[in-house]
Amino acid sequence: MDLWPLLTDDGLTGVHSVERQLRPRTVGVAVRSGSVADATEVVTALCTDWAGGAMPLIPVTPGAPSMDERMERVLLASNIDGIKGRGVLPEDVVDRLSDRYATRTQWLLRQLVEAGDRPRVQTCRGVSSDNPWYIGYLAVFGDLPDGPNRESNRWNDLRGDLTFADVVDVETVDGDPSAADLVARIGEFDRATAVSSTRTRLATGMSGGYNQGLPSSSRFSWGQRDVSAKYGPNILVAYEPGSVEDLALIWNLRARFAHPNKFPLAVPITGSIEQDLEFFAQESSAHHFFGLGHDLALTSCSVSRDRLNTLAAATDLNVVDPWELLGEIPGYCVSSAEVVQFSEGEATVAAFSPNEIKELGHEYLGSSHATWLTLTTTVKNSRLPASPAMRRARGQRPGYLHGKVSHVGKLDEFVTLQHPTGLEVLRALATDRSLQARTSTPGKAAEHLIRAAGGELSMFTSAGVTRLLTELTRRGHASLVKRRLDQYLAGSDAIPGDARYDELSAKLDQALGVPDLDEVGYMNFNRLKQLLDLSQNEATRWIDWAVRQRVLLRGVEAKCPHCAHRQWRTLADAIPELVCHGCGLTIDNPFGPHKIDYQYRASEALLRAMGHDVLSAILAIRHISRIFGRRDGAVFGAYPGVELLELGSKTVSAEIDVLVVLGNGQWLIGECKTNARGLNENELSKLWTAADRVNAPATFTATLDRSTNCSNLWKITEDPNGRPHFALTAEHLYDLQAMGPTYDEEFFAWRDDWVRRPARVTAKTEDGVGKEFGSFLLRKAEDLRKRMRAPWDEVTE
């Protein structure tokens, strides 16, 4: 049963599509800040490593205790196995960020020999290291060593004196370095570069995301790096000559997009910088075109922002912070897909797929060198967020990066895949925040109701359903008491303001307690239909579904002729199971939904869920998840009730009504109320304090009440620190379609009425929303795919 977006502790089970990425081991390499000679040595070495172009550079000041935390986050999400510290980074930092044997990278020359071609390879040779353009050319073209590496050749079964010049035609820069020369050289597709050659025999160059959609005007970022998506690879790095930080920046930006033959590019600060910037801005052959917008970013680590703003004023370039553009480096690999059978979170697959064997060959994969390859397997629609706690297991064993990371072995071996459960992922993300997360009692009650419903949360998106469930789960005569309380408070000044209802209603609920199953009432079909506010056919569909899912229990009322006592009995107790004399099958409902005066009551799961007022939390999860969608992995999952504790503490520090885990591992947290008047400033303050603690990109509140019943507290759009905040009211939670915004529309904008898009949709009324839900129930009983699958079999009137 697929319960997404609910996070559970159920192990992944069933048939799933798995994406495989097989690649040589790759590492991030530390480079000394301030030393162009050291940077040149590192880049040249990377150009001799298989997949070296996908290995990030880490600028580090010698003697520093660690690297920049922002760079560490980039490395965490990148498809690499560890760090090569080179004596620049402390060993404890290297060990913490590395798998076992991470530095066992592979010699590119062996792959060039295996490929059998003799390509032309452009290098940066001919450009002096004193030339201002040297860093720009080095990052784009790289370089190759002149002499042989006898140890690496011997390890790879190659002739000891074999050099790169023996298998490729090494080309130099024979003109004056300039912006025009750089663009002309990257545009020559009949030759590779020393950097791009490192991708030899790796058919897939995984790339960072390009902006494929409409320009966004939303105030929400969701931690999804909107700035990076806006510009994609259209980035120009301006650098002071000799800046190793900017060399690492342009290298990592180009590696993020698999070193394309266009932007990102770098330009030195020289006397002709204004003309160079204008050239790059106007030279369309260096640009990438995608989506509906076209934006060019100018950035730098060594040039001040004020200087960049002055330089960009006369061009179409936009000045952007480099950390807004840097992101994970997906890398090079052989990519394939297969269908895998999981059982309780585990599956077994062959070490190498047929496509991997085709691309790399039996001879190579059958050698000992193949034992140093890495396989990452990602389950479709269950891509794991990046997490330090999940990335490495004990003893530097590989863990998870969007999927299971495995060190593969021989041709005839198999690999066991594991996939963590949703709640295991949540607990790992909490550990990353030095917190412990556990499900709350209301959360468990909500989970049980979602399970009972089979994950079909749309069956609750109706004010009539809410009204019915509320009536079914009240203790006998509780509705009368509450109605009299409302009448009393309407003319009473004993307690001032809105607080008077909240205080007395809370005391009443506490006094009444949660009713037991035998204490709640039951209703017949006509009463259920009246509360649902649906037609007979529509109500029948919903009730049949609720009984089938054990949300409602169907029975009959029995009256004792002696004492007139009335009691409710399940249908199984009152009517024996009937078997059809024609087909021999059991008849589940032989008398239809209302020929016998059936009486319906709430199930135990429904009773507990309504007792904890979790329906608003369940519908908030549904709405947010549908707005973001599942296909692109924007939402990993959610849970309707989580308690947070500081690590090592037994005291709950925060209670979260709804916690939504985004695809990037960040959390949206929300406070949910059945009635709008239940929200107060203290509740909001606790919500925002928790948001500060977990660094949430946004917070929200949710209620089943209409927006007209909401106070100004519900209309707040940001917390005191400027974090975006939004409110979901009945107009959102009962929105059956729940489609995301289009161009120039806001995510989760305040709704004064049922209408969602005034420019395109005729305004809806509450009655119209009810009719939409009824039509949905009727369609749900039909086979809607039949028109496409077998149109000849449709019955037409």
Image (cartoon, helix red, strand yellow):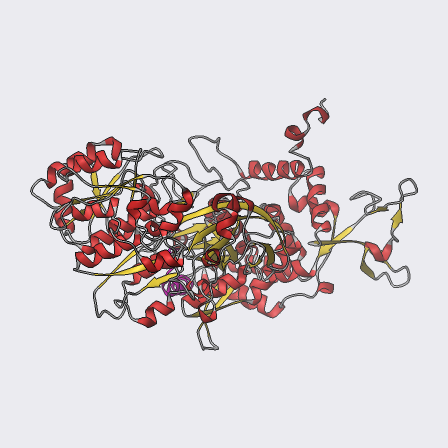
Does residue 653 belong to the magenta stretch?
no
In the picture, measured across the screen, residue 748 lies left or right of residue 33, that is: right
Residue at the location (18% across, 40% down)?
173
Establish if 437 lies above or below 791. Answer: below
Residue 396, located in which quarter of the rendered image? bottom left
Q: From the viewer's perspective, is 784 left or right of 20?
A: right
Taken as a whole, is the magenta stretch helix, strand or loop?
Answer: helix
Query: In the shown orientation, is residue 386 left or right of residue 67?
Result: right
Which residue, as the protein is rendered here, is positioned at the far right?
581
- Residue 593 lies, with reference to residue 391, above or below; the image says above
Please tell me which residue lies in front, 228 or 490. Answer: 228
| Image quarter of the C terminus | top right
Q: Position of residue 721 (x, y in %)?
A: 30, 59
The stretch drawn in magenta includes residue 690: yes
Question: Is there any visible trace of residue 687 in the rendered image?
Answer: yes
Looking at the rendering, the stretch of residues picked out in magenta corresponds to: 682-698
In percent of width and height, residue 612 lies at 58, 62
